[in-house]
Amino acid sequence: MSSTSRRSLLRRTCAGTVALAATLTLGACSSGSDTGAASTGPVEITYWSWMPGTQETAEAFNKAQSKVHVTYQKSPSSTEILTQLSNAVKAGNGPDVVNVEYNALPEVVSQGQLKDLGSAKDTVGLFPQSVRELVILGDKTWAVPFDASPQELWYRKDLFAQYGVTAPKTWDDFRAAAAKVKQAAPDTRITTLWTDDPAPLTGMAWQAGAKWFAVQGQAWKPAVDDAATLKVASYWDDLVKGDLVWTQKAYSPEWTKGLVDGKTLSYIGGPWSGGGIKTMAPDQAGKWGVLPLPTWDGTPATGLMGGSVFAVSKDSKDKRKNEAALAFITFATTTPEGIKARLGSGKSTALPAFTDVRSVAATTFDPAYFGSENPYTVAGNQVDTIRPGWVYGPVQLAVNAELKNGLAKVASGGSLTDAVKAAQQKAVAEIKNRGLNLAP
């Protein structure tokens, strides 16, 4: 679909942003009861998030029109917001709008905490397939994507050149480069395996063709230890056993120092990682770059690493609140004004999922830090290579916790292979424990 066609359809499917909020004539976007239809004054809605720039987004929306007022509440983290949401919904006072991560969405949906956003289906249909299919569960639309986060390799261009390492196209290339780096500088490694964060493993398994969860009829089929995942786990077990990579906690002082001091040459992250690198090493402009992640056969492919969505809690029952919530969500995810507000600090390289506003996002960050490799261009090119068909399961967070436990053991002789097998057992047990149907 062309950019012009997307914009035309967007106007026809409730994404006219501020004008819609100003009039609250979201007929095709309405849901819930009509209890507030006769209300006067601005419609008050609440919005919960933990992410930088989200308060600025709410403030920009409030300033742009007078018919809706968003009250923002900051949560400490992506994990804590889930606990807060669960407790609030149980008490009957959940927020109107809430951000959750892609991997948590099915779990929140399975617990009955969100409202079906079927009225936003046409708007969500404008997003890339790789993120669109993550918010459509059971033929219902449960959220609107904000960002797309293809997994990428952030690397020190100057040190790769110093050690004679070329950009790895395949994972075999990457292993050879890892050995070359260690031989040239014994106190240096090509990258780090995080021992407390399963996100990189999840993305690499996704890239390899893994599908950890599937729906068979009315039942869930977990396959966290499928062949593709075991292949990835075995590969990283070999790198660790060969002392070719560091094993450190994510974003720990040790890990950060290694990157800044040039003792760690690369970092497997997402598009948002660029802003963090610039903040962490502001005087290393021109030394850092970003590449597509190596693949198994050289064919472009990647998985997702991180990313978030906008959803509406089931406690948002008033029709006018629902309309206002959808107007705000549309503003935040699909408009230049919303994107500028979210990323206006110039410290983030998050890639919006909605294609038409990526050029606006790119203006908020000075790409000169990365030289000729514009992070928005590289990430944008990778979105279409995200493997389709991935499904996060209703017990994904329990699987993540089990993987985290297994990763913690890797630094002291444990294996990723064992961690993956334990995570599969956890998935089966949790599905049963929660009274969900388990496919044979």
Image (cartoon, rainbow, N blue to C red):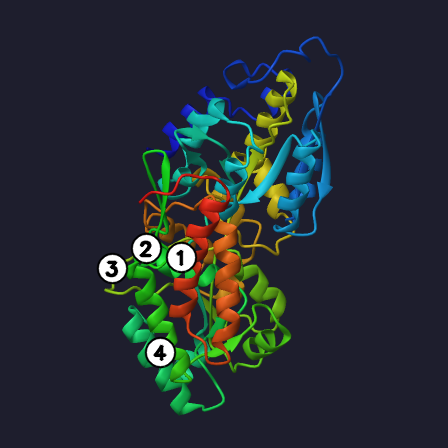
Label whose residue precedes the other's in the sequence (2 or 4): 2
In percent of width and height, residue 28 lies at: 50, 16
Residue underneath mark 3: 299
Q: Compared with residue 195, is residue 89 higher up or lower down, i.e. above or below?
A: above
Residue underneath mark 2: 210
Viewer-side residue, 84 vs 147: 84
Q: Residue furthest right?
A: 41
Residue underneath mark 4: 238
How far separated are the C-alphas under marks 3 and 4?
23 Å
Question: For this view, does 435 lie left or right of residue 232?
Answer: right
Residue type, numbered disc 4: Asp
Depth check, mark 4 against mark 1: the one in front is: 1
Question: For this view, does 423 lie left or right of residue 216?
Answer: right
Visible in this render: residue 291?
no
Dot 1: element: helix
Depth check, mark 1 against mark 2: the one in front is: 1
Residue underneath mark 1: 424
Label whose residue precedes the other's in the sequence (1 or 2): 2
Label whose residue precedes the other's in the sequence (3 or 1): 3
Residue type, numbered disc 2: Ala
Residue type, numbered disc 3: Thr
Dot 3: element: loop
Numbered disc total: 4
Q: For residue 94, what is the image quadrant?
A: top right
- Whether residues under marks 2 and 4 lie with C-beta atoms below 8 angstroms apart, the answer is no
In percent of width and height, residue 278 lies at: 58, 65
Question: For this view, does 122 lie left or right of residue 401?
Answer: left
Depth check, mark 2 against mark 3: the one in front is: 2
- Whether residues under marks 2 and 3 lie with C-beta atoms below 8 angstroms apart, the answer is no
